[in-house]
Image (cartoon, rainbow, N blue to C red):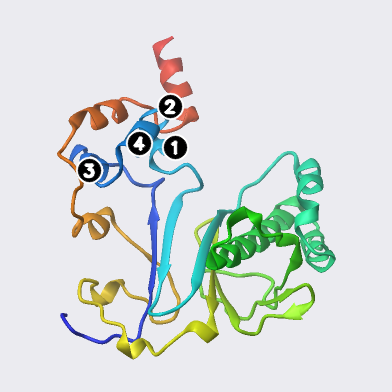
Amino acid sequence: MPGRHVRMSVRWAFNFRAWSPTAEDWTLCNQCIQPEETHRISKFVFKKDAKSSMGDYAVLAAQGNCILGVDIMKLETRTDVASFFKTMRRQFTNEEWRVIQSPATDKEKLRLFFRLWCLKESYVKALGVGIGFEVGRLNFDLTTRNIDSNVTTDTTLKIDGTPMSEWAFEEQLLGNHCVAVAVNKNSRTSLENMENKKIATELLSSAGEFKVLDIKDIIKNVEPLSEPDMSFWENFQPKAEDPSQWKSKQAQKS
């Protein structure tokens, strides 16, 4: 409602992998991006990469007058765990590495690895400094070892051994993805002054939980930057969703 003051925040997620775009939606999305992005997206071989190149979800987090950062990581399995861990070891503290190595199986070790990496990314994104920050200086203490779809807020951070008590971290699972939001508590002001004139109340979060949106929720208020171009859809529509679907189509032809 116009002018309504809501003590809430925005935590949105969209599952690109599950999205099967219509011609209308795909064309409208193209109207909302820069021409160079249209060119880049058109080059992808598979639909899944054209929709989203990393994982299955895109996430957005925001709240009034607050410094925050968000990241999401797919909890993938790997066959090269030993060499992968050897390459990434220096990005973690000794304490964090002991946590990663504590489970008996590679699958559980990877879950902890990706969760810690997600936390580091969320903090660096909040700072806005990108890959130049030495994430090996960050030490996250996972008070709750196993997270689920409920929001966990008891993870703490030290940098070079110094507690960062002004930072809070919200974590949860979205399917087989972990999500982390880094929030600077000292930068937060009263959310009673946050006006949500265009955001429906049901799309707001009261406890840090992510709302999984439908494409219609995302595009209903967009303002296109260009005229419709159906060639963008004609480039996308014939492509296979992923390599497995392409192989299946090739097998049917032979």
Query: Residue 165 at what x, y percent from top left?
Result: 65, 85
- Asked whether disc 2 touches disc 4, contact meaning CB atoms under 8 Å apart, the reply is no
For label 4, the SS is: helix
Whichever of labels 3 and 4 marks the residue nearer the N terminus, that label is 3
Whichever of labels 2 and 4 marks the residue nearer the N terminus, that label is 4
In the rendered image, the vertical position of residue 216 relative to residue 181, given as above or below: above
Whichever of labels 1 and 3 marks the residue nearer the N terminus, that label is 3
Hey, what amino acid is under mark 2?
A: Val
**Residue in front for this viewpoint, 164 or 109:** 164
Hey, what amino acid is under mark 1?
A: Asp
In the rendered image, the vertical position of residue 246 relative to residue 136, given as above or below: above
Q: Is residue 140 visible?
A: yes
- x 29%, y 57%: residue: 214
- Rendered-image quadrant of the N terminus: bottom left
Q: According to the image, label 1 marks what residue? A: 49
Q: According to the image, label 2 marks what residue? A: 45
